[in-house]
Structures are given as structure tokens and as C-alpha cells.
Image (tube, rainbow, N blue to C red):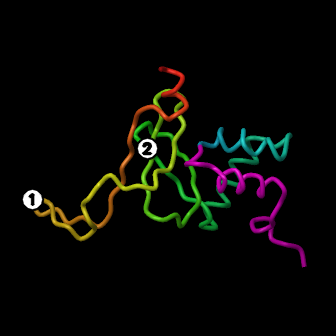
Amino acid sequence: MENDKRTRNTQQRGAIADAIRESSGPLTVQEIHEAAQESVANIGIATIYRNVKLLLEAGEIQPVILADGVTRYERAGLKHHHHFRCRGCERVFDLDVCPISIPDGSTLPGGFQVDDHEVTLYGLCPQCNESSA
């Protein structure tokens, strides 16, 4: 029996999944393309879009949309985390620390009940900070 095209593991899909899994933060489609090309030199951008769609539908990755409006993708099921966007290189990094000390279930002034939060910090990553010094 032939595998369904949607679930078949191909070298291209493996390279895309590896690029997302091994990244230090969520990636744009272009960044996924660049990273996947290290494993599969002739992988096309249409292949990236098609496989990102399949990985989304399979629940293996999730979208991340920051204030710049660009959709990025990261592994699904990551523990609670936030993001840092470098103003120098424009890369986005995962932060394992939570800078907000408001526990879920808190009630804010005005009666707002907190059940989750997202935070994106902006500044310079260590590499850009070092090169600007």
C-alpha cells in the first residue's frame, strides 16, 4: 500500500522539520528555506510552503506572529516561553525565562481574568550587541 502523499516522510520534509526543530527560535518561510538548503541543496520555496502547510495541519508546528506581522513557525507543544527579536539582525529567539510575574488565574484591576500571556522583548542579541560595541 502506497503512503498518503500528505503523511509520507520525504527528505525535503525531514530537512524542513529539522530546520524548525533545531532553531533557537521561530523561523520565517525564507529562513526555513535557507536552513533546509543546507541538507537538500535544490529544495524549492514552493516545497517549503507545501510542507509547512502539511506540518501545520498535522499539528507538528505552530505559527508565531509578532508585531511586525510576519508569520514564523516553531515546534508545537513547546513549554511556556517568550520571544526576543533582535533589532540588528532581525532574528527571533526563544526565551526560557518569563519576565511577567502574573500567574494564570489572576484578576487584574478592572476585572480582567488572566488565563495566558505572550511577551516579545526587543533589543540586540549578543552577537549584534558585541559588534555594535
Left or right: 8 in relation to 113: right
Q: Position of residue 90 (x, y in %)?
A: 52, 32
Left or right: 104 in relation to 19: left
Q: Position of residue 120 (x, y in %)?
A: 39, 45
The residue depicted at 28 percent of the width and 68 percent of the height is 104
Q: Residues within 10 Å of mark 1 (few under 14, many from 20)?
A: few
Give above or below for 70 relative to 101: above
Residue occupied by mark 2:
66
| Separation of residues labelled 2 and 1 (CA atoms) | 26 Å
Given residues 25 and 63, the one toward you in this image is 25
Residue occupied by mark 1:
110
Q: Position of residue 38 (x, y in %)?
A: 80, 42
Q: Residues within 10 Å of mark 2 (few under 14, many from 20)?
A: some
Which is more N-terminal, label 1 or label 2? 2
* Disc 1 element: loop
The residue depicted at 26 percent of the width and 66 percent of the height is 103
Given residues 99 and 108, the one toward you in this image is 99
Tag 1: amino acid: Gly
Tag 2: amino acid: Leu
Residue projecting furthest to the right: 1
What residue range appears in magenta? 1-27
The residue depicted at 51 percent of the width and 34 percent of the height is 126
The tally of labels here is: 2
Residue 45 drawn in magenta? no
Give above or below for 119 relative to 113: above
Given residues 128 and 18, the one toward you in this image is 128
The residue depicted at 41 percent of the width and 33 percent of the height is 123
